[in-house]
Image (tube, rainbow, N blue to C red):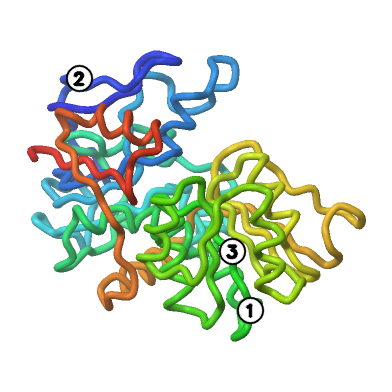
Amino acid sequence: MKALQYRTIGSRPELVEIEKPTPGPSEILLRVTAAGACHSDEFIMGTSAEDYYFKPLPLTLGHEVAGVVEQIGDGVHDVEVGESVLVYGPWGCGRCYQCAQGQENNCEKGMRAPGIFSDGGMAEYMIVDDARHLVPLGDLDPVKNVSLTDAGLTPYRAVKSALPTLVPGTTAVVIGSGGLGHVAIQLLKALTQSTVVVLDVADDRLDFAREVGADHAFLSNPDAIPAVKELTGGHGADVVFDFVGIQPTADLAAGMIRTAGHVVVVGVAKGAVPIGQTTVPLDVTGRAINWGSRTELMEVVELAKRGAISIHVEEFGLENATEAYDRLHAGKVRGRAVIVPGA
């Protein structure tokens, strides 16, 4: 079968032929119908040999996966061949305290996420380790909804964590309107009565942010701080969601957060907001979001079924999946890049 693999440190992904897997006991073989390309993949491929801690190469990419159940292994129950499903990505041990709550993203023994710590779904077929990691997709289009598993789930957890703060009359800032950020904008409009302000680096991205619901949009530079302060009567934002995670965006978040506000960092990079008595306003809370729980993915799917959120996708065949990553690397993807085997 064909698979897109990261094979050499510092290289770009390659389309290769590998053996089609066979499911063992408790495993499920999926025929992949769609797989999302993510900036986290770029983070993996940009990691130096000294710092690389993911699955030993070669690594089949793809942690956002939708598929049809092709074959089930011994001991698998409540899954039917032919069923359309999404793959919950943060695979945990299933037995620790966090996993017992469905919080496998916080597994005390560490995640075995496909496309990161095990082979993923950027291929024609994929093995899923356990039926609990499958969420029924129903009649939803797998191509348009595959990214609910990360680009939907992660911002949902971020927004959900801040809902007690985001009462009517508050202001939420979203830094970055890309794959995850454009979903966060929709979630904020669906779940709150807050004013939504978006920061990004180009006018076309700000136009996209307005299309999906932003009330205000500013270029992401130091001038955004006084602009947000002016909008909020000098107080600053109640919550800032940083979907980029580099130091310049962390500095923006620190500069525009108000007293008792919340800074929620989602972007995978090395930026940090120094929270202390003299570095940010008092009572500011900081949080770094890591994916989401299995139950939260079910909630995200329900939101999609009700039309509350819609992920904008650009489709690529598996044969030109490398082009998707080139466009992603160059910041030219509008929404989410989705690989469709056989397209």
Disc 1/disc 2 C-alpha distance (Å): 50 Å
> Quick one: which residue is furthest to the right in this view?
278
Hey, what amino acid is under mark 2? Val
Q: Which residue does the image show at 36% across and 36% down from the upper left?
A: 328
Q: Secondary structure at mark 3?
A: strand
Q: Is residue 247 above or below residue 231?
A: above
Residue 50 drawn above or below residue 5: above
What residue is at 39 percent from the left and 58 percent from the top?
207
Q: If you read the primary sequence from the N terminus, does the residue marked by circle 1 or circle 2 appear first?
A: 2
Question: SS of the residue at dot 2?
Answer: strand
Mark 3 nearby-residue class (10 Å; few <14, some 14–19, many ≥20): many
Which residue was labeled with disc 1? 170
Query: Is the Cβ of the residue at disc 2 closer than 8 Å to that at disc 3?
Result: no
Q: Position of residue 251 (x, y in %)?
A: 71, 47
Q: Which residue is mark 2?
A: 16
Quarter residue 140 falls in: bottom left
Question: SS of the residue at dot 1?
Answer: loop
**Is residue 194 at all visible to an observer of this figure?**
yes
Q: Is residue 290 visible?
A: no
Residue at horizontal 53 percent and vertical 26 percent from the top: 53
Q: Position of residue 8 (x, y in %)?
A: 39, 13
* Label 1: few (<14), some (14–19) or many (≥20) C-alpha neighbours in 10 Å: some
Residue 173, labelled with which disc? 3
Image spot of residue 27 (x, y percent):
26, 44
* Left or right relative to 296: residue 21: left
In this view, 159 is above or below 107: below
